[in-house]
Amino acid sequence: MTGRVIVITSGKGGVGKTTTSANIGTALAKAGNKVVLIDTDIGLRNLDLLLGLENRIVYTIVDVVEGRCKLKQALVKDKKNPNLSLLAAAQTRDKSAVSEEQLKDICETLKKDNDFILVDCPAGIEQGFQNAVAGASEAIVVTTPEMSAIRDADRIIGLLSAKEEIESYKLLLNRVRPNLIATNDMMSVEDVVELLACDLIGIIPEDTGIISSTNKGDPIVNDEKSLAGQAYRNVARRIMGEEVDFLNLEEDKNFIGKIKNFFEKTIKEIKAKI
Amino acid sequence: MDNNSIENGFIVDLSNTKNTSQLIYELSSILDLPEARNKKICLKLGDTDLNQSQLLSIKALIESMQGEIGMIDTASVQTKAAAENLSILVTELKSEVEAEQTVTPEEIDKVLGIVTTIDGDDETHKENIPLTPIADFSEVAEAGGLILNGDSKYVMMDTTGILPDEQKNHEENPESLPTLYLNRTLRSGQTLSYDGNIFIVGDAHPGSEIIAKGDITVWGILGGIAHAGAQGNVNAKVRALKLNAIQLRIAGLYARRNDTYNVPYVQKSNEFTPEVAVLENNSIVIYKKLRRDE
Amino acid sequence: MSFFTDFYNKVFSFFKPQDISENNVKDVARSRLKLVLMQDRTNLTPKILEQMRGELIDLLSKYVELDKNLLELNFEQEGDQVALMLSIPVIRAKDEKEIEETLKKEALLKGIQLADDEEENGEEEYNTNEEEADADKTSENQPEELTEEEAHPQDCDNQTNDITAQNEEEHKTEAV
């Protein structure tokens, strides 16, 4: 099989790259795909924490490229899902420990027996970013509806579009707060899409559950009730090529609107089943 | 406390205290803090058993220190009943850190010799190898020795092929090695490696790595990775005031913190009892006190 | 610092002529971002944009009478290409005579340019200094593609590089 290599990047730090990587990876694996997550944030690794795998890491990507272990030995299997594995970054080294070529090679090798390889990119546009992008043919740009995050996302989109290897890049809008959008205190999804002129792959609502899921080391997609979890599952389905409507985050205030919404949803579901 | 949220509350966690006198001592020292004044005190009592009169005196203590008892979080049936008699609000939340099970001697007999599945990534290593998981310290004290229990604080990992062939297991007295003495905190991302023993006065934070040819001694909280006898010396030991290492490695054997105990940071306390990890019968075993005869 | 802020706001106001209600944080953010992104994509600073706008007005007003305050300068991105969109509300096209007159005056002014450099016209002083200082280093920066809407200047070569002369010329034109 030939897997797809998708880099998850943002430019700005703290917008949710790692959370997104962990959740999309978990969701894709839950849907039956073989997935490898690669943490390329060498020196500041965190993906292992979000997956609750930090105590299992013996070898890292640096050990692989420096020949201390085989690639297979360094892949840490997820606790819950055997389809998902993690290639962790080293905590005690820096970005220069791995080169673009080496990352490319790793991606090429992993492609052979995995459906998806998700590369969690470090913040910034320096060597760490260049390395992470090197092996990828698709990109997901994570941003939030904030000035600085959008500006940085624009920069990243510019850099990605200049790269020949990147065949497609999509925007994932994280931490959307419908109540703030309703009061015109936050830019709407449409505003951001218009400003960045980039296709959307997902809208993730702000969810306090993310904090507790991070603390537990259990991605929020495993929580069936969470709205953010649902949104991430939808992103995974879109990556797999399904057409999924975006979640309606703006709640209709009046009763009739709610009923209408409910019926529309039900009809859609019935249609989908047929 | 999602459902029974209390305004102006102040949570006091006493779930780690071992007896009533210690509990009252801790409580009074916490209530002495200015932040606790005029607050509704929420007590986390863990599984401490308290009767009605003990609870009444705790209530009186709180009131004497300008507080008010808000609610009690307990896992003990007796405490719960007593609180209900005194019409104090009770919740039965499981403490965030996995409730420590008290192990009776019968249970210990039962779990001795248990076969624990090792943590293999590769499917070829699926066969079960009898391993001795590391005991939880609270249980060690009760049994007066090592305990085997699937729910232990550490789990052995599959270490097949981890040590290079040239580093064969060997016995060497760490006393004959030189010692590196450090008086500092080791932070995330820092690696300390030395061809001898390492002695650190300070904490080793999660994300740090200590690799020594001989023993590792941390006079503080050990939260990172510690690899003693890194060149195969099976006599090497890891010692710390509080062993919370994410992974303990001695010679060619690795153990990871059990998922249920996987808390990166432990609270500082002045009541830590030193712990030592040694190799016994091809597994890593932790003792709560440093033995003289070692 | 406040000098720069003023300047920024001034430029900013060019791209959003209508009043933005202060309560609408979303729109403020949107328009600020629009400007910032445009600068990022084109490497044009607010100063250069201001200068470019000024020069365009000067040039075009030789041929048409236009509403300077409503002139809009925007960048639009389609794929890899950035297009400069210029929207100019034309009040009235000048007839040939007027244009000739203006051009003559300009030529005349060129002759006596900088003769009274010290005594500058008060209201334009700010811009003039700013532009003079920047004229040299910024002249290299050009947008990738120029698309002009509504206005079609025929002879761009006539554009003078001397800003002082331009400004004076502009005043004369207004008086006509």
Image (cartoon, coloured by chain):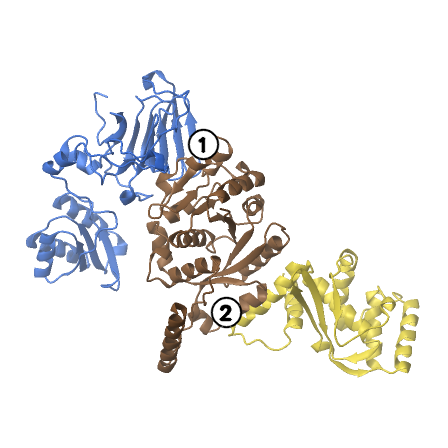
Residue A155 lies in what quarter of the image?
Answer: bottom right
Q: Position of residue A202 (x, y in %)?
A: 47, 62
Q: Earlier in the sequence, mark 2 or mark 1?
A: 1
Q: Residue furthest front?
A: A274
Mark in the foreground, 2 or 1: 1
Residue on which the image places disc 2: A188
Evaluate whether residue B269 shows in this view: yes
- Callout 2: helix, strand or loop? loop
Q: What shade has chain B been given?
A: blue
Q: What shade has chain A been given?
A: brown
Q: Amino acid at mark 2?
A: Ser
Q: Amino acid at mark 1?
A: Cys
Disc assigned to residue A69: 1
Q: Position of residue C73 (x, y in %)?
A: 70, 70
Q: Residue at x 54, y 69 (%)?
A: A191
On-image quarter of the C terminus of chain A = bottom left
